[in-house]
Image (spheres, rainbow, N blue to C red):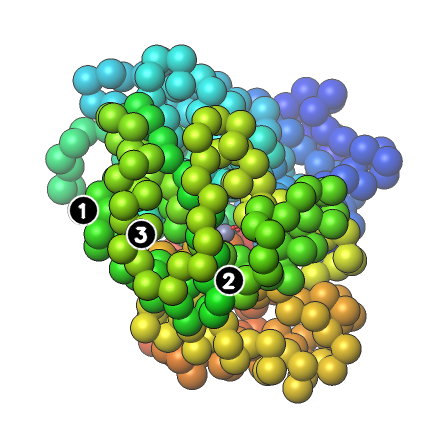
């Protein structure tokens, strides 16, 4: 019985078989994906992970890898009774190397824990997300998470200087030296970024840190039309140095957030679209941001934060979208990207496409405007009905977009992968998978 063998490897208290304890590990954050599992194993070191994976490869026991379980595409759910491999106990944070601006962290550390730990010595981690207090470093590497500051610092792959990971046969690859130049063949660490747990189990990572801006300015800009908001988001990129975020949301989402959390509306008038803009600098960038905003076309009103509580209040209108939508029931979450020149067309056409596929559905659109990335959330459709997903993703493909900008493919978009990847690319991915996970035990329901 595998559970007995696991107990010998990681200790009895770290092997969960009680259904009440297992329950929270078999359903995803959205509630759209629910599976089942006989056992959750919680190793505490890379050696324990290696022993576990080696055992599972030898006995053909499939594993579902799980970090903070905050993914939105069902990638960490044991849909076919897989053993859950929880990495949350790998939570060590090394000392910051001030010379290189790097740190080595265990994959179970949350983004929030890392931010507060490195913040003590004046550093920050470039990836930030609304789910920062649950999302883990390992999970965000596996999904190559983007988040709120991709515009400024890039995605997770851009922060990774090396990883330690256990491959599908139980062997360990470790490249955590953090050399600033290191051209010695395949970059295995970055290959694991976005591999969604299908190639290896990330146990630690060497991450680049950033110097956070000394002073920040946040403004909420209101526009009559999506078109003017999108044009302004493109213009902002080029006219404002130090821009960290340009986030889009629309009037229905703002109203939903305000009513869900009892917030007052930011403006007296109702507008069509909003941009939340944040800039950082060594001197107060508020006046400069105000000047730049004044030069933009189509701005109907502006709320400029003057202090930290006001900044947080403006951010809340954007960050609370996910929680507000979750209160309406299980949403279909389609995280897509298109070329910036087609963003307006996407935002304008999606609601019609959704209504045509599912007449009773509601569409909620928000996202990272400067990255061409929109989160299409759809409520009022049965979780298992994929017709609306199919209609929206077809539209995205027709606009030369990607069916996953930052959340990954998971199980939710697996059958749509060929909309974004060619047969040769998928064949190459399968070849890599077969080489690194020959028994096919790592996240078998995900991606391919
Ligand atoms: C965000 O940008 C996250 O807030 C979640 O990526 C998006 O809930 C979503 O669809
Ligand atoms: Zn996002």
Bin the neighbour count of mark 2 within 10 Å (Cα to Cα): few under 14, some 14-19, many 20 and up: many
Circle on res. 273: 2
Q: How crowded is mark 1: few (under 14 residues within 10 Å), some or many (20 or more)?
A: few
Q: Which residue is drawn at 58% across and 41% down?
A: 316
Is 5 left or right of 218, judged from the image as shown?
Answer: right
- First reached walking from the N terminus: tag 3 or tag 1: 1
Q: Residue 185 carries which label?
A: 1
The percent position of residue 7, horizontal first and vertical second, equals: 70, 26
Q: Looking at the image, which residue is at 39% across and 51% down?
A: 246
Label placed on residue 224: none
Give the mark toward the camera: 2 or 1.
Answer: 2
**Which numbered disc, 2 or 1, marks the residue that appears first in the sequence?**
1
Check mark 1 vs ligand 2: CB closer than 8 Å? yes or no. no
72 left or right, relative to 1: left
**Label 3 to label 2: alpha-carbon separation:** 17 Å
User: Which residue appears at 72% of the width and 42% of the height?
Assistant: 261
Q: Quadrant of residue 42?
A: top right
User: Can you name the residue that lies furthest to the bottom here?
Assistant: 356
């Amino acid at each position: 019985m595998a559970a007995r063998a696991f107990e010998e490897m990681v200790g009895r208290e770290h092997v969960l078989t009680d259904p009440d304890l297992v329950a929270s590990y078999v359903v995803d954050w959205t509630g759209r994906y629910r599976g089942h599992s006989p056992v959750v194993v919680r190793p505490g070191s890379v050696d324990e992970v290696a022993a576990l994976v080696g055992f599972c490869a030898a006995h053909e026991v499939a594993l579902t890898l799980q970090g903070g379980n905050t993914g939105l595409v069902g990638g960490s759910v044991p849909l076919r009774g897989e053993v859950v491999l929880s990495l949350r106990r790998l939570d060590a944070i090394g000392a910051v190397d001030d010379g290189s601006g790097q740190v080595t962290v265990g994959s179970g550390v949350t983004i929030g824990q890392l931010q507060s730990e490195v913040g003590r010595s004046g550093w920050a981690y470039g990836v930030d997300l609304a789910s920062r207090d649950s999302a883990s470093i390992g999970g965000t590497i596996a999904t190559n998470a983007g988040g709120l500051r991709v515009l400024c610092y890039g995605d997770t792959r851009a922060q990774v200087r090396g990883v330690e990971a256990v491959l599908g046969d139980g062997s360990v690859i470790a490249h955590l030296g953090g050399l600033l130049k290191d051209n010695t063949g395949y970059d295995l660490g970055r290959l694991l970024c976005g591999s969604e747990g299908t190639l290896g189990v990330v146990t630690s990572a060497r991450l680049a840190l950033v110097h956070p801006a000394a002073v920040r300015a946040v403004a909420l800009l209101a526009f009559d039309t999506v078109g003017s908001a999108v044009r302004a988001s493109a213009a902002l990129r080029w006219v404002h140095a130090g821009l960290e975020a340009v986030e889009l949301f629309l009037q229905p989402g703002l109203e939903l957030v305000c009513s869900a959390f009892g917030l007052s509306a930011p403006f007296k008038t109702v507008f069509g679209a909003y941009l939340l803009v944040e800039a950082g600098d060594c001197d107060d960038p508020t006046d400069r941001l105000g000047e730049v905003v004044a030069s933009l076309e189509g701005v109907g009103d502006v709320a400029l934060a003057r202090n930290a509580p006001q900044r947080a209040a403006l951010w809340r209108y954007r960050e609370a979208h996910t929680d507000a939508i979750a209160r309406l029931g299980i949403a279909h979450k389609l995280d897509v990207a298109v070329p910036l020149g087609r963003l307006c067309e996407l935002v304008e056409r999606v609601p019609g496409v959704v209504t045509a596929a599912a007449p009773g559905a509601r569409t909620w659109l928000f996202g990272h405007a400067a990255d061409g990335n929109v989160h299409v959330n759809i409520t009022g459709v049965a979780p298992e009905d994929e017709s609306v997903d199919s209609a929206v993703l077809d539209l995205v493909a027709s606009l030369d977009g990607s069916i996953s900008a930052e959340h990954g493919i998971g199980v939710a978009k697996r059958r749509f992968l060929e909309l974004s990847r060619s047969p040769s690319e998928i064949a190459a991915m399968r070849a890599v998978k077969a080489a690194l996970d020959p028994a096919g035990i790592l996240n078998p329901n995900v991606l391919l």
